[in-house]
Amino acid sequence: MAAIISGKLIKLGASQNALGGTELLAERLVKGLKKELFKNTNIVFNRPDLYEQYLANGKNIFNFQDLPNDRMYKNFFKSEMVNRFSHFVFNSDYQKEEFCNKFDFKGRSISVIKNSIIPIEIDQKKYDGKVNLIYHTTPHRGLEPLAHCFPKILAENDKVYLKVFSSLKIYGWDEKDKVFEPLYKKLKDMKNVEYSPNVSNDEIRAELVNSHIFAYPNIWPESSCLAAIEAMSAKNLLVLPNLAALKETGSKSKFLYDFTNNASEHIKIFHEQLSLAIQYVQKQSEDYKSHLNDLKMYADKNHNLNEYLRKWQQILSNK
């Protein structure tokens, strides 16, 4: 939960110690633009009620990071508070569509500024006979299906390795994280699996350079996915469903599959696609190398931090 109040990053509420994607983007925005652009301007990323005390002063911009069915919006668009915002920014085309279909934005100023990254420096993806999978987002998004599927993958191919970087501690939710401890233990006890709780973004970026596949059987609808974007920038294959904004974020992936709410069927489809992706890595074909280049080019061009900052500068300059 974050906001930029007159150029200062402020985090309030239960997630005030959070270090997730929203906080990362807010920090990069503050550091990437001149301070005078933020003068008398407030940018709220979520939970507007927490920052109501600041809204009376200056121009207020809402940068949505969630989907419209989130409980925080249940009364927001019926309240007077919504009228305190002069501009609304969406982080994906999918998110914009979802909000505009559910709430009335007629007469309101809106923009789409896609969540973005600093491109990851990498030349050719290294391969030594081992296929390295990575999962580097929070557990509730798809870690359980992955843990269920991986032993089957390993039974087929013992040259596959999985690194997991995941916990709710990244949001400061230590108590909520306890429910996932049995899952973490299960992963720790698995052969060819290395589990760690969340680490810094710099460490994740370094790990992505050495991994081959972002294995992500997502079950939690997202408005965007920075984890997938960074994985593409580091030349990782994406194996993920077309659930919510992943259809947009992962549109260039050869292993984007149709999502189903049937848990066992989802795991079956994911397993099939992950097996194909592993074989694709092992073949080391020219088509494979070309696909990695396409993924990187797409991520670096369409989700580039410089473009992100340019669009924000344009909005902040038109006060």
Image (cartoon, grey):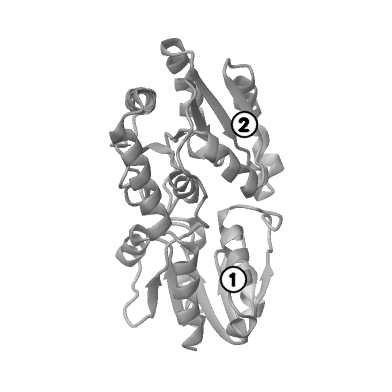
**Residue drawn at (51%, 77%) of the image:** 61
Crowding at dot 1, Cα within 10 Å, few <14 / some 14-19 / many 20+, comes out as some
Would you say residue 9 is visible in this rendering? yes
- Would residue 48 appear left or right of 178 to someone viewing this image? left
- On-image quarter of the N terminus: bottom right
**Residue drawn at (58%, 76%) of the image:** 33
Q: Amino acid at mark 1?
A: Gly
Q: Position of residue 229 (x, y in %)?
A: 45, 49
Q: Position of residue 48 (x, y in %)?
A: 57, 69
- Would residue 39 appear left or right of 287 to someone viewing this image? right
Mark 1 residue element:
helix
Residue identified by numbered label 2: 180
Question: In this view of the protein, which residue sits in the foreground, 62 or 250?
Answer: 250
Q: CA distance from mark 2 to mark 1?
A: 36 Å
* Image vertical order of residue 306 relative to residue 274, above or below: below
Q: Nearer the viewer, mark 2 or mark 1?
A: 1
Q: Position of residue 13 (x, y in %)?
A: 68, 60
Question: In this view of the protein, which residue sits in the foreground, 206 or 121?
Answer: 121
